[in-house]
Amino acid sequence: MKISSNFDSGNIEVVGAHDPADIRLRIRKDTAADFFQWFHFRASGVRGLDCRFSILNAGEASYPKGWEDYRACASYDRSHWFRVPTAYEEGVLTFRLQPDRDSVYFAYFAPYARERHRDFVARCQASSRASLAVLGETVNGDDLDLLVIADPGAAPGDGRRACWVVGRQHPGETMAQWWMEGFVDRMLDPADEAAGAILAGAVLYVVPNMNPDGSVLGNLRTNAAGANLNREWAEPTLARSPEVFHVRQRMRETGVDFAIDVHGDEGLPYVFIAGGDNVPSLSDRQRRLQAAYFESLANANPDFQTEHGYPRGGKPNLTLCANQLAEAFGCLAMTLEMPFKDNANAPDAIEGWSPARCRRLGADCVAALRSVLPDLR
């Protein structure tokens, strides 16, 4: 039996793995930071063994309440991910499986590999609606990809609205990239009426992965410099947060009429949106647009709801993406959150919240954007 994590987004430390009924593990901290919660590893030589995995430092993780009612993800083929029986007691997360194959992967949520990202952006270029640009380099020198989606027949500078879509600022929140597939695939479908209506009046700027370095490193929240990118939007720097720096620079060139920042939440078992609804300059128009978007998305997608979410009010934090953009551009800017657990309103006993549901939500967000597009200016 062997436990390994020396691969893209791998994260685990082995304390003891001599007895399959008592495999003891720890999660490694983020690069240059104290955050941790993401795990991803492979267990080999386990066919037919009754395996019990214990993450000993789960109670010290960044969001220990995230383990309550959580079930770990497992996969034999790295394509289909299913949930396994999991318990959280006295600071230890324990999950069990008797694999029917020689090796099995476990992860906090279904991983989204760098190669899949590259395949995705390469595939998008087959559409006449999409073009690919590199905004700049990450801390470790990776490309920061930008997909520009527009009507190929549109004339430059014709006053179209600038709609920005960014995701995976926190690299462990892989659901954001699964969401991107659903959203972008629908926007590139020439037969889709809603997508066509959007491109008649807007250009979309899509950053599928804001944090390529942290994704490969197996971090939960930070980039290779230890920066939490969603706390860097007020004053990003090339040294600490070049990813945000480059995106903000392009936003200043295009303007921003709409922005959605896609995330995952460790603790809340719901799909919800946190709007920039307490920024100092928030207008009645921005509030009306947000309410209209909420209503449209709730009608389009059965997983989205507005009853549960983050508390509203309090002192505005303008270092967050949505808050900073709402304040700086006077636009509709929101943070979309999906669960690591399951949707408590519509649980799935096999997969829980899954890549397929992320993709469906992404596709349905196209309809919601269409509904508010006429009023963005």
Image (spheres, rainbow, N blue to C red):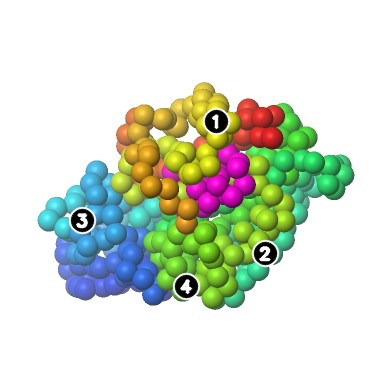
Image location of residue 310, percent across then percent down: 36, 40
Q: Foreground residue, 75 or 102?
A: 75
Q: Mark 3 points at which residue?
A: 94
Q: Which residue is drawn at 24% across and 43% down?
A: 69
How far separated are the C-alphas under marks 1 and 4? Answer: 39 Å
Q: Residue furthest front?
A: 280
Label 2 Cα crowd, 10 Å radius (few <14 / some 14-19 / many 20+) = some
Q: Mark 1 points at which residue?
A: 284
Q: Name the residue under label 4.
A: 224
Q: Which residue is drawn at 39% across and 75% down?
A: 32
Q: Foreground residue, 123 or 134?
A: 134
In the picture provided, is 335 more to the left or to the right than 54?
right
Q: Mark 3 or mark 1, which has the lower sequence index?
A: 3
Image location of residue 372, percent across then percent down: 63, 30
- Which quadrant is the N terminus positioned in? bottom left
Name the mark nearer the viewer: 3 or 1. Answer: 1
How far separated are the C-alphas under marks 4 and 3? Answer: 29 Å
The residue stretch that appears in magenta: 320-337
Q: Which mark is residue 214?
A: none
Name the mark nearer the viewer: 2 or 1. Answer: 1
Q: Name the residue under label 2.
A: 135
Tag 2: amino acid: Leu
Image location of residue 377, percent across then percent down: 69, 35
In the picture provided, is 135 more to the left or to the right than 51?
right
Tag 4: amino acid: Ala
Image location of residue 58, percent across then percent down: 23, 60
Tag 1: amino acid: Asp
Q: Residue at x 50, y 72 (%)?
A: 240
